[in-house]
Image (spheres, rainbow, N blue to C red):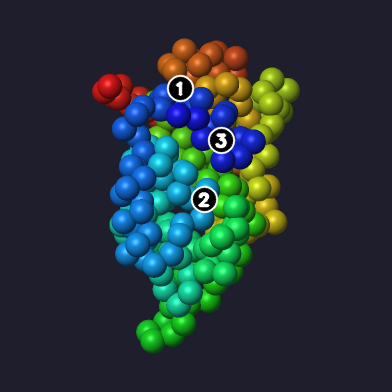
Amino acid sequence: MPFHWSSHASHIQSVFSPWQQQDGYELSFLLVAEQALGIQLPTMLREFYRVWGRRTDLTRTRQTLFHPDHLELQSGWLLFAEESQAIYTWAIPGTALLLPDPPVYYSEPPAERGERKWTLSHRHLSDFFDYLTYGHALSHGAPYGGVVHCCSDATRIHIADIWHPIEVASAPMGVFPDPTWRWVLYGSTGLVMDCTGSLWIAAQTAALRDMVRQQLNLTWDALWEQKPRGR
């Protein structure tokens, strides 16, 4: 069941293990969650849950997209995701729930008895999903990956010469949200690389990962490989 929430979604999905029928939540489950909240979820959030919501590799490898029955309405905000160390929470303003692609805000935990202060994180929910899923592919969510901690300028130039740039309307994962940032990644079908600091590589196959190592003459500092998903 394809669901392309953005122009990057097709490429992102190519980096992960293929979609399977049980990867999303049933519509009836989402309707129960909506009834408990007394709202209708934004269409894009509902569709993402329906197709990919149960896939922890896309949604909970580092940051946490809440399970539908853990969504929370708080002072007019729909809280739907949390940073890995609970440093901040993401939410959609209640006034934007009917928009097809609403903005996303973040807030650090409030002081005791204080009100949360919300700051724009991503101008669109689709941008947030790009951030979340690319970031999770590069955080051990993709089937295969590797990291080189000391990435030289020459290697970065070589990467830019060979692979297509991918510009995400988001700060990189691991950096405080800022909608003015542009996270520049590189890749091709089944492959994505981040050389913002260290060089992180995520791939759907070991062959793609090995091809990068050979072309860039890399020595891995660490590798990962996921177990095949059952069908």
**Mark 1 residue element:** loop
- Measuring from the top left, give residue 225's x and y in whole percent: 35, 25
Which labelled disc corresponds to residue 227?
A: none
Amino acid marked by disc 2:
Thr
Q: Residues within 10 Å of mark 3 (few under 14, many from 20)?
A: some
Q: CA distance from mark 3 to mark 1?
A: 18 Å
Mark 2 or mark 1, which is nearer the start of the sequence? Answer: 2
In the rendered image, the quadrant that contains the N terminus is: top left
Q: Residue 110: where, in percent of width, then height?
A: 43, 78
**Which residue corresponds to the image point at 46% horizontal and 57% vertical from the top-left?**
41
Q: Which residue is mark 3?
A: 4
At x 61%, y 35%, the residue is 8
Q: Which residue is mark 1?
A: 204
Q: Nearer the viewer, mark 3 or mark 1?
A: 3
Is 128 left, or right, of 225 in this rendering?
A: right
Q: Secondary structure at mark 2?
A: helix
Return the residue found at the far left.
230
Q: On the image, numbered disc 2 is attached to which residue?
A: 43
Between the C-alphas of marks 3 and 2, the distance is: 13 Å
Quadrant in which residue 119 is drawn: bottom right
